[in-house]
Image: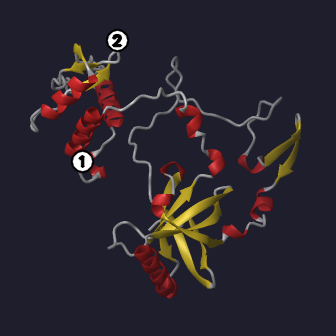
Amino acid sequence: MARAFWSGQLQVSLVSFGIKLFPATEAKSEIRFHQISRSSGERVRHQKVAEGDTEPVGKEDIVKGYEYRKGEYIQIEPEEIEQLRVPSKHNLEIAQFVKMDEIPPAMLEKPYFVLPEDETQAEAFAVVRKALAQSGRAGIGKIAFGGREHIIAIAAPQDANLPGMMGYTLRYASELRSAEQYFSEIKKVNVDAEQLSLAQELIRRKTAKFNAAKFTDGYEAALHALVEAKLKHKPLPKEEKPAKRGKTVSLMDALRRSVAEKAEKKPASRTESKTGGGLTLVKAHPPARRKSA
């Protein structure tokens, strides 16, 4: 198992026990690019050079600097940052409990696996985990790592068979832009009851249990095809032309036709028309076969 990303005490009132956090996600991209010179083909490397100098500065000679006046800095040593008096560096105190669905999705930042620090912490860990699972609530506190203090929600996993807990770092309210500021530009319209009913029927027919494994990175696959084609000196794959547009129909007609389609048929793609607020139906042709790379 990888080394814990953070370890310390989880404190719920007078109850305290050791936990450790591990990132629940990892980068899976297999295509990694380097910067190279177009003329020589050699790799371009970045070097840290002080202003007015030409020689690279060694890692051991670089410290953080705060610009308190234009062009003037105070130096901050790494050990000085380490000694900052931030209790949440080693102690995660739960300030309150909330229902998970009360947390706006836009505030969720990154998930972590939460484990007991060792076997001696397992009993207290299990009690708190089960209490969170049965209450359907998450404990909210603050935790410091990575050069800042984060809000974090500690909750039982959705899968009741998993014995651990989950931690979700949250964004601060000040980091979220105002939705009202952006959505205020949307034109207000009256929703027709029949159109709404047809749209709800479309949603009902497309509703299924979420399975994340069904979704893969198409951009990554396209990059693979491009690299493979260049390596084998084959024609480069190019973006397929969009299907031809059909006749423009009204929103009501488009909804009715969509609902009337047989279940085994692929639904027609729909794009907004520039004329009269209608929709343009696009016939759902199977994608053209791409030459193998």
Q: Is residue 177 left or right of residue 214?
A: right
Q: Is residue 293 visible?
A: no
How many residues crowd mark 2 within 10 Å: few (<14), some (14–19), many (20+)? Answer: few
> 107 or 66, which lies in front?
107
According to the picture, the residue beneath numbered tag 1 turns out to be: 207
Indicate which disc, 1 or 2, sits on the residue closer to the N terminus: 1
Q: Secondary structure at mark 2?
A: loop
Q: Residue 194 placed where, x, y %?
A: 25, 34
According to the picture, the residue beneath numbered tag 2 turns out to be: 275
249 in relation to 60, above or below: above
213 in relation to 91, above or below: above
Identified at 52% across, 33% down, the residue is 183
> 53 or 14, which lies in front?
14
How many residues crowd mark 1 within 10 Å: few (<14), some (14–19), many (20+)? Answer: few
CA gap, disc 1 and disc 2 = 31 Å
177 in relation to 78, above or below: above
Marks 1 and 2 in Cβ contact (< 8 Å): no
Q: Is residue 258 visible?
A: yes
Identified at 38% across, 42% down, the residue is 30
